Image (tube, rainbow, N blue to C red):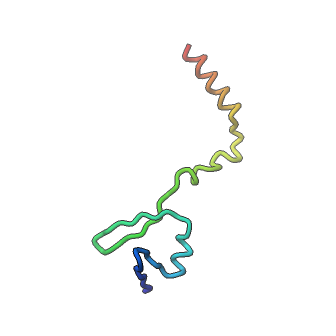
Amino acid sequence: METATIENNLLRLPERFAQRLRGRRIEIAEIKEGILLKTTANPIAEAKGFLKGKRFTTKKYMEMKMTEKELES
C-alpha cells in the first residue's frame, strides 16, 4: 500500500496515481472506510463527437424541424 503526504495544504499522491489523475477533476468524499477520491465525469467532453459518422447535419436537423412545424399547423 502506498501512502500520501499532506504538506502546506497540498496532497502529494504517489506518482503512479498522480499521473493517472493529472488534468482531471476529482470529487473528494468522506466515507465510513476513510476518504474517497473519485474522478468526475465531464458531460461536454463525453458528448463531443457522438454524432460523428452518423450523417446527421444541421441541414437535416433544420429540415426535420420545418417538417415538425408544418405538421403542427
Task: Give the x, y percent position of residue 21.
Answer: 52, 70
Quadrant housing the N terminus: bottom left
Residue at x-position 69% and y-position 31%:
60
Quarter holding residue 32: bottom left
Quadrant housing the C terminus: top right
Residue at x-position 35% and y-position 66%:
29
**Is 7 left, or right, of 34 in this rendering?**
right
Q: How many marks?
A: 0
For residue 36, above or below residue 7: above
For residue 2, above or below residue 33: below
Q: Residue furthest left?
A: 32
Residue at x-position 53% and y-position 81%:
15
Task: Give the x, y percent position of residue 27.
Answer: 42, 63
Q: Residue furthest bottom?
A: 1
Q: Residue furthest top?
A: 73
**Is 28 left, or right, of 22 in this rendering?**
left
Quarter holding residue 46: bottom right
Decide which of 2, 63 is in the foreground and name it: 2
Task: Give the x, y percent position of residue 35.
Answer: 35, 72
Residue at x-position 63% and y-position 48%:
50
**Is 29 left, or right, of 39 in this rendering?**
left
Task: Give the x, y percent position of residue 28.
Answer: 39, 66
